């Protein structure tokens, strides 16, 4: 089982930064965790645009590239299991799924092999493995971090963001991704608590963390949350099938059976379902716009349960929660571990309006301090 696709063997200076292997690094091939892609991949001629800050920091001795991390194949899955390149080991418990698709990035940070990792998040692919591995992850506002040189999955959903053990690490990661980034926002005063059909232990952990922060928390129902999640997955999978159209014709065994089956099914989504999903996206955006007039942030569990054993990975879709909501409307979202009355931490998800990464990280710092045992 493997966390890394390529491990940098040079001396580490400053922050050790891991990069998910869907992001081009000059001189290295980008495999997307897939045999078919790896077979055709040539070394990238240039870095992805989002690596400019890392390269500048490396030149000044403040950071170094730790290597390229493994992932759920083609970034199209939430378990993190990869039969082609191995499955990264969950640092909390090797018997559990690491979560996907940024599984290697989460495992590298959780195991102390990197200080910061870049992941991509199209439907929860930073936040889900962060929750599974007990670390923090930030899905950024769609379009904020450039995607030039990033392997596409669903272009109207794809984002790049940082993963780290704590909020300070996420802030450092954002400063590398967006030089000049600062956390200037005040923590929130008003938080809307979205209910989920979640494990009571997870729910209690989220509520206890919010109470410890001392914020004004008000229950809020999102109309049609299930319909919004369905619409998001419909659009995401439609775009994924288009992005990977040529790969669906690869030789047998060059793409994992689970990913290939999902892509082929996605290619059959009818036009009327896609149109309906786009209308639901518009409706959801309007509803959230009204909520931002009342609340600074929304809070809910990142996952509706705790990460399952590898042998029970098929239950992951049932506990993925509502991570895809933030991708549907393009807003930022933070996943942060919080104490739970269980062997593992739970994870709280905070969602903010577009461009509110500074507010989310300010809020995360308050939660972190309030829940520290």
Image (spheres, grey):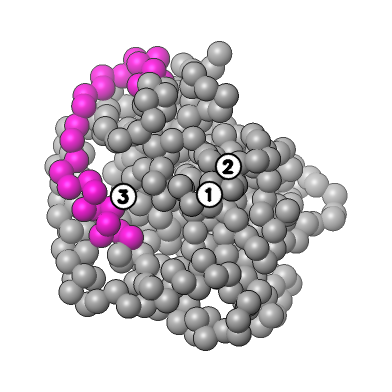
Question: Going 53% across and 27% down the picture, which residue do you hit?
Answer: 345
Question: Going 51% across and 66% down the picture, which residue do you hit?
Answer: 258
115 relative to 308 in the view: left or right = right
Query: Picture coordinates of residue 228 (x, y %)?
Result: 23, 53
Residue linked to disc 1 = 313
Residue linked to disc 3 = 325
Secondary element at tag 2: loop
Q: Quadrant of the rendered structure where residue 19 is?
A: bottom right
What is the span of residues highlighted in magenta in the rendered image?
206-233
Q: In terms of secondary structure, what is the magenta stretch mainly?
A: helix
Question: Going 76% across and 47% down the picture, which residue do you hit?
Answer: 61
Query: Picture coordinates of residue 126 (x, y %)?
Result: 50, 49
Marks 2 and 1 in Cβ contact (< 8 Å)? yes
Q: 123 and 83: which one is in front?
A: 83
Question: Which label sits in the foreground, 3 or 1?
Answer: 1
Please say whether residue 208 is one of the residues in the magenta stretch: yes
Mark number displayed over residue 309: 2
Secondary element at tag 1: helix
C-alpha separation, residue under disc 2 versus residue under disc 3: 26 Å
Q: 156 and 187: which one is in front?
A: 156
Question: Which circle's residue, 3 or 1, is located before the other in the chain?
Answer: 1
C-alpha separation, residue under disc 3 versus residue under disc 1: 22 Å
- Which part of the image, by quadrant, shows the C terminus? top right
Task: Note whether 15 is above or below 269 in the view shown.
Answer: above
């Amino acid at each position: 089982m493997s966390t890394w696709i390529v491990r940098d063997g040079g001396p580490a200076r400053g922050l050790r930064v891991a990069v998910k292997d869907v992001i081009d690094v000059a001189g290295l091939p980008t495999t997307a965790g897939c045999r078919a892609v790896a077979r055709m991949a040539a070394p990238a001629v240039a870095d992805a645009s989002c690596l400019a800050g890392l390269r500048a920091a490396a030149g000044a001795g403040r950071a170094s590239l730790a290597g390229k991390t493994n992932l759920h194949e083609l970034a199209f899955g939430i378990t993190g299991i990869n039969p082609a390149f191995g499955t990264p080991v969950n640092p909390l418990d090797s018997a559990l799924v690491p979560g996907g698709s940024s599984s290697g990035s989460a495992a590298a940070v959780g195991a102390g092999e990197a200080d910061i990792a870049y992941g991509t998040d199209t439907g929860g692919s930073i936040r889900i493995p962060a929750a599974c591995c007990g670390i923090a992850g930030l899905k950024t506002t769609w379009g904020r971090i450039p995607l030039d040189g990033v392997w596409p999955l669903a272009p109207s959903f794809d984002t790049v963001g940082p993963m780290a053990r704590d909020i300070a690490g996420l802030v450092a990661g954002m400063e590398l991704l967006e030089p000049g980034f600062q956390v200037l926002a005040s923590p929130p005063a008003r938080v809307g608590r979205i209910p989920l059909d979640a494990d009571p232990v997870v729910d209690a952990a989220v509520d206890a963390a919010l109470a410890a922060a001392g914020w004004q928390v008000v229950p809020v129902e999102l109309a049609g949350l299930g319909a919004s999640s369905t619409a998001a997955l419909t659009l995401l999978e439609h775009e994924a099938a288009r992005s990977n159209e040529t790969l669906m014709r690869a030789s047998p065994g060059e793409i994992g059976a689970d990913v290939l089956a999902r892509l082929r099914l996605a290619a059959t989504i009818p036009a009327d379902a896609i149109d309906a999903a786009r209308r639901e996206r518009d409706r959801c955006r309007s509803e959230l716009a009204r909520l931002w007039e009342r609340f600074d942030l929304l809070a809910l569990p990142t996952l509706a349960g705790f990460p399952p054993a590898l042998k029970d990975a098929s239950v992951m879709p049932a506990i993925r929660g509502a991570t895809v909501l933030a991708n549907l409307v393009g807003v930022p979202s933070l996943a942060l571990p919080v104490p739970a009355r269980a062997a593992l931490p739970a994870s709280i998800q905070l969602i903010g309006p577009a461009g509110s990464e500074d507010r989310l990280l300010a809020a995360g710092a308050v939660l972190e301090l309030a829940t520290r045992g």
